[in-house]
Every structure is written in structure tokens, then in C-alpha cells.
Amino acid sequence: MALKLGDRVLITLGIAALIVGGVWFAVQHGASQAGSNTQQLVVVCQSRDGFYRADALASEVEYTVTTTEVDGEQGENVVRISNGSVDVVSATCANQICVEHDPISQPGEEIVCLPHGVVIDVVADEADAPALVS
């Protein structure tokens, strides 16, 4: 039994759709893999007091940022980089917004502690971190 012209067109369109879908999946999967590569991402922590530190997002480190608040009191933020994300695990500020913030791991995300003037950014390159104005 010979295939009719309409059957051939439908089969050809089906094969073309499978090929286009496969290419789309491969491109999307490759882009998500590139975006999740924490080996190259950098965590930049800055304060209005001049504190500056840059660490690889892939590192395992915890450190304390000590600052002077607007009222002259000292403030502290404990920052932890672990398992490909960064988080403020404790702070002496009253509002605790930085502590309650979800961990960050993607370029462009940041955690801010306004009372202490601390900003933590995830960037693709250290030069991409916005400079704090004193």
C-alpha cells in the first residue's frame, strides 16, 4: 500500500517537530547547566565602613562583618557560603531582614542589611559587583 501525499506531509511534519523539539531541549538544557556553574560565580561582600571581601560561591566559608551603625553602635553580620549559596546566618540589627532572607546563589541576587550598611552580591565576575558609595 502506497502512502498518499497527505500522509507523507504529516510524517515529514512530525519528524521536523521532533527534531526542532530535540534541538530546543538541548539548547535549554545547556543554558541551564551553564547558569548553574557555581565554580565561576563570586560572592562579594561590602559595607559602608569599607569592608570588602570576595569569595568563590563554590567555597565553604563563614565570616563576621563588623560595622559601625548610624547611631555609633557596632553591628555584626555572620555570612556563610556553603553548598553553592550564601546566607546571613545571624546579625545584631533589630529588624533581622537580612537573616530572614532566603539564601542566594544566582548572579544579580543580593542580600542587604540596611542598619549595618552591608551588601552581599552574587556576580559572574568580581568586577561586576556594584561599588558602594560611602
Image (cartoon, grey):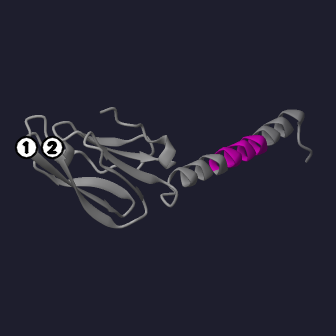
Image: magenta residue range:
14-25
The answer to if 16 sits in the magenta stretch is yes
Q: Residues within 10 Å of mark 1 (few under 14, many from 20)?
A: few
Identity, as a three-letter code, of the amino acid under mark 2: Thr
Residue at x-position 48% and y-position 48%: 126
On residue 68, which mark appears? 2
Q: Which numbered disc flags the more N-terminal residue, 2 or 1?
A: 2
Which residue corresponds to mark 1? 73
Residue 41 x, y percent position in the rendering: 48, 53
SS class of the residue under badge 2? strand
Instruction: Tell me, yes or no, whether the two marked residues, 2 and 1, touch with CB atoms within 8 Å.
Output: yes
Residue at x-position 20% and y-position 44%: 98
Q: Main secondary structure of the magenta part?
A: helix
Identity, as a three-letter code, of the amino acid under mark 1: Glu
Residue 25 x, y percent position in the rendering: 63, 48
The answer to if 12 sits in the magenta stretch is no
Q: Nearer the viewer, residue 3 or 121?
A: 121
Label 2 vs label 1: CA separation?
6 Å
